[in-house]
Image: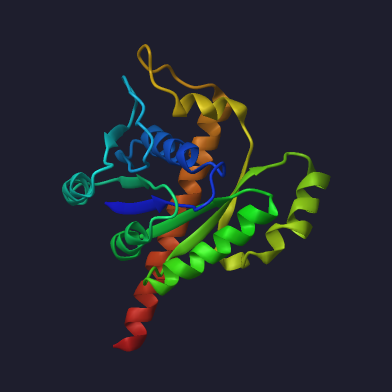
Amino acid sequence: MKGIAVVGTRGGVGKTSICHLLALGAAWKNIPAYLMHTDNREPISVNGRAYTFYDARKPETLSTLMGAAMNNDGLCIVDSGGNRPKFDKWIAESVDLVLMPITPDPESVDMALLHMQQLEEYGAKNVRFLLNMVSSNKNEQARDFRKYFYKIPEDKIIGKLKKVAAVKRLRESDTEPFKTPPSNVNNLSRTLYFMVKSALENIEESEEKEQSMKV
């Protein structure tokens, strides 16, 4: 089991959407996915989704669920709210990958870089960025990279996701059994899953190489 925390101190960058997309993408590849809701907001109600969703707002509940999930295969995804130093310390010590979505906005980028620094001071070794809600227009995309994203170290970026409005359905409670999302949402979820899978593999490879050099 791999633990992934999706974090960010700024609202509106897509943390919860990313968590649901990642869980969905894993499920479509027959990878068990466990999504832990730790935000202060009320969790949604789910019915018939291809991944498991838990209300893990209480620290003791999260610890218990994570401990149980880590004995299984798949992904354990923590949807984390911002501005919680104690929780950041726990994340730094407990997960394999810290994923920070950022949008083409100066405040989003600056806050994410500051948060990365704080997490690394707590001991997080594998903080990575996901460029989210990137424009499909090439000229606008190039402008966003020149104006905002240039501040992000390239080796810390796992990829980019374009904006898909229908993703908001994943954040809504199921009033009836969950229906298969439209193809653009499914495609985006698979894209995200492969980005995260590749990032985890690169991290594991780097750690193995580092260990071999110490021997």
Between 138 and 29, the one nearer to me in the picture: 138
Residue visible at 35% across and 64% down in the picture = 92
Residue 143: x and y in percent read 80, 52
Residue 64: x and y in percent read 16, 48
Residue 122's quadrant in the figure? bottom left
Q: Please tell me whether residue 76 is drawn above or below residue 210 in the rendered image.
A: above
Residue 65: x and y in percent read 20, 45
Q: Please tell me whether residue 6 is drawn above or below residue 53 in the rendered image.
A: below
Q: Residue furthest right?
A: 139
Q: Please tell me whether residue 160 is drawn above or below residue 129 in the rendered image.
A: above
Looking at the picture, the colour scheme in use is rainbow
Residue 180: x and y in percent read 45, 20
Number of on-image labels: 0
Residue visible at 58% across and 59% down in the picture = 111
Between 27 and 111, the one nearer to me in the picture: 111
Residue visible at 34% across and 28% down in the picture = 50
Residue visible at 38% across and 61% down in the picture = 85
Left or right: 67 in relation to 34: left
Left or right: 130 in relation to 67: right
Which quarter of the image is occupied by the C terminus? bottom left
